[in-house]
Amino acid sequence: MLDLSLAGFRKKLWGLERRENLFNYESSGVFLWQAFRFVIFIRIAKKLKIIETPHRMKKNESIYSKLLTSLKRLRFFFRDPLFISQPISQKETACILEHSRSVPYEGKNVDIYSHKLSQSFYENNTPFIRLDTGESGYDEKTNCANRFYIDLMSNLVEGLALLLYFWPSKDDKAIFQISQILINDFGDAGNVGILLKKNLIKFKLEKRFYRKIFLRFNINKLYVVVSYGRASSIDAARSLGIEVVELQHGIISPHHPGYGVSSKGLELTYFPDKFYAWSDFWKSVYDELCLPVEVVNHGFPFLYDGIDKYLNMPKDPNKIVVISQGTIGKDLASFIFQNQFALKNYQIKYKLHPGEYAVWKEYSDLLKLNELKNVEVIKACDLYALLSDSKYVIGVYSTAIYEAIELGVKPILVNLSGIEYMEDLLTSGKAVTFEGFMCNVE
């Protein structure tokens, strides 16, 4: 019988991939499992109702609204790095593949994970470009001369992939084999065969486009945020001898499907050459994964600049910040609702993840919580200001929990899928479970 907890599912899937040697399945030079492991993990886990969709747009968005959004994105086509824009320099140039989300910082909307790196390039007169997409659904970043948008490329890839999907291909054999292996253990959850074929076609098209971009701008180093979503660009860079560096964007853990890989005897193709960690703590966590990657403590200036003015703020013992996430959003809301009476003496600030802004009203229990006098649902805000005077933060496995610790806030972890990512905090005593917290209160 299949264990429908996140930990049980992950254990079964990772045992299966080792037993069936899935990492070595290859088609047209693409290692299918290595390239698409993360999206397969998410797809099956969603179909089995183990997790929710991480970042979602509104389900009932009108056709007019969708059309208007598409028309607005047309302006990004004129900042296309391949078909329209001219190269900014013939010198060797760095390239940053930015995170899709933007955050207000120093008077601009920026990608917080690469912003300081960009600033250092400006200060040192290092030629560089930034690649972004306007399709994310998040607030747009502030325009600048060296930011280019890959929307046109993405649209072309989607269109061509749709046409090529029905074309017979020798790639179908390996895809069928992987699909059958997964069906034997998980049933037809996620239609993995369709997922693999679409993603393989897109991978090959994207690799070609990225190679052209890198050659056109004379790229000599590629920086990526979220490497496990950038396999095609990493492969394109490798084919041209370009060094690849990943910038840390969130929690790293042996339980994470993007990083938790047993690399013994495996040739891992789509990991970066270097990983820029936020601190010595995160460097040690990454080192323990034993991946073939050089790890550097590069720092996270956004965090330390952001919290500096809020350090040593007096804490309100009756204020709790709840940190929500799309993957466990409904379950967390239900948990807090079920425990509303235990928390009735606390002022609760319920902070949504940006991916939930458009959909949180689908959480019936959160709607009920929002009617309570001691609960306030919050969207965009200065997270550090919100946390700074709070005594406690409730969550499951958000990066914001680590940021809260830096501000002297005590984490209370809810036992939902993903809490195992925070095992180090529980064993070290830096965090307590919700049950442990309530015992101490009582």
Image (cartoon, rainbow, N blue to C red):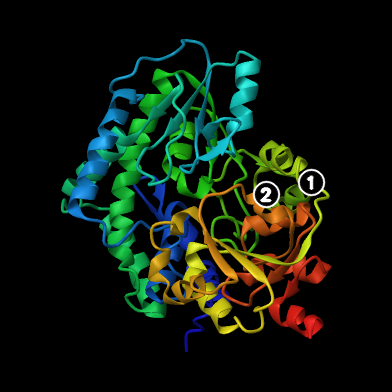
Residue 289 visible in the snapshot: no
From the top left corner, tell me how far across and down residue 354 is, in percent: 48, 53
Residue type (three-letter) at the residue carrying disc 2: Ala
- Does residue 348 sit above or below 306 in this rendering? below
Residue 280's disc is 1
From the top left corner, tell me how far across and down residue 246 is, in percent: 59, 40
- Does residue 366 sit above or below 85 in this rendering? below
| Lateral position of residue 91 relative to residue 281, left or right | left
| Lateral position of residue 207 relative to residue 198, left or right | right
- SS label for mark 2: helix
Q: Residue at x 46, y 62 (%)?
A: 22
Counting residues from the N terminus, which is met first, the one under dot 2 or under dot 1?
1
Residue type (three-letter) at the residue carrying disc 1: Asp
Instruction: Say few, some or many: other residues with alpha carbon within 10 Å of mark 1 (under 14 / 14 to 19 / 20 or more).
Output: some
Determine which quarter of the picture holds residue 143: top left
Determine which quarter of the picture holds residue 103: top right
- Does residue 131 sit above or below 177 in this rendering? above
Residue 398's disc is none
Q: Residue at x 44, y 19 (%)?
A: 145
Farthest bottom residue?
1
Q: CA distance from mark 2 to mark 1?
A: 25 Å
Camera-side residue: 298 or 1? 298
Q: Residue at x 44, y 69 (%)?
A: 52
Residue 101 visible in the snapshot: yes
| Lateral position of residue 148 relative to residue 197, left or right | right
Residue 385's disc is 2
From the top left corner, tell me how far across and down residue 249 is, in percent: 59, 46
- SS label for mark 1: helix
Q: Give the mark count.
A: 2
Camera-side residue: 304 or 261? 304
Q: Residue at x 43, y 41 (%)?
A: 139
Q: Which of pointers 2 and 1 indicates the residue nearer the eye?
A: 2
